[in-house]
Amino acid sequence: MRELSIPRFVDAAVGGLIGLAVGLLLVPIHPQRTVQRLAEPVLDPGMAALRDLAGAVRARDLDEAQGSLRRLRNLDSRPNALDEGLAAAQEVVRLAPLRWRDRTSLAFYTQAVRHLERSLHSSRSVARRLTTALKDDEPISEELPAAIDLLADRAQALRCTIRADDEPHRSRGQILRAVELAGRAQGRSSDFDRPHTHRLGYSGLIAVGEFRTAAHELLIASGLDTEEAAELVRRAVDGDEPD
């Protein structure tokens, strides 16, 4: 029996090596398409939930806001598969000669997807805080749902722009416009010593802070570094025009 098991082991090993060689050398997976397929079930429902949140806040519909929050929370289980897919795609471009030319583009796309995912995580915090604001009957100025709508729209456009390998200048400008709108919803910082002049309640003010974090992540997804993205957000909050 031992003599028979050795050839079987060798056959299995050879078969595995042949399969690996075929997968890496002859027909390796297309890494960027694989990442796209894995990203869509996470990013697209998240952006749709964000748009629904804007409508719910505009209508002051607590049930709809809670539904949007629930959909954003339900995405938590999916990033695990996305992270595994990103790691597998990076391994393919590292090992498969036919995919070596994709290393730079995949690195950029992978980074962008990770920051889009993080933006949705901050958006979930926005949804949680605004749901609380509606429960507590806090004032919510009309600029805030407009800002959420714009951010969701630009996140979707940015994903398409990155996929097409285009320069996302317009998306960056609109993301900063959304930050400016959220700042208007909050009220100017010079009014902070007089709470009665605030246009948002406690939960709404925290939601604006989380909104800026989401916008910051989208700017990084567009290809900016962390410091430049933070500076642009700060300037938008202060009402400065970007260069």
Image (tube, rainbow, N blue to C red):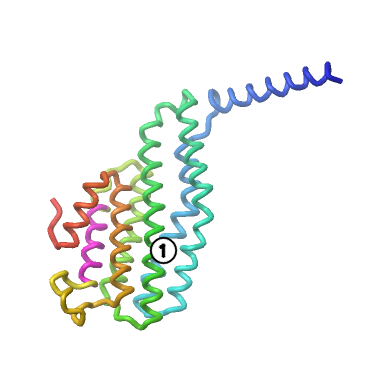
Q: Is residue 196 left or right of residue 69?
A: left
Residue type (three-letter) at the residue carrying disc 1: Arg
Residue 66 percent location from the top left of the image = 46, 73
Horizontal side of 8 relative to 14 (left or right) equals: right
Say whether residue 174 is magenta: yes
The residue labelled by disc 1 is 124
Residue sitting nearer the eye, 3 or 10: 3
Q: Front-most of 96 and 125? A: 125
Question: Start and end of the magenta stretch?
Answer: 172-185
Q: Position of residue 213 (x, y in %)?
A: 31, 58
**Horizontal relation, residue 22 to residue 36: left or right:** right
Q: Residue at x 25, y 72 (%)?
A: 143
Q: Residue drawn at (28%, 54%), measured in percent from left and top?
A: 216
Label 1's element? helix
Image coordinates for residue 178, horizontal then vertical, percent: 26, 62
Q: Residues within 10 Å of mark 1 (few under 14, many from 20)?
A: many
Where does the N terminus fall, quadrant-wise? top right
Task: Examine the rendered structure and indicate whether residue 242 appears above or below residue 32.
Answer: below
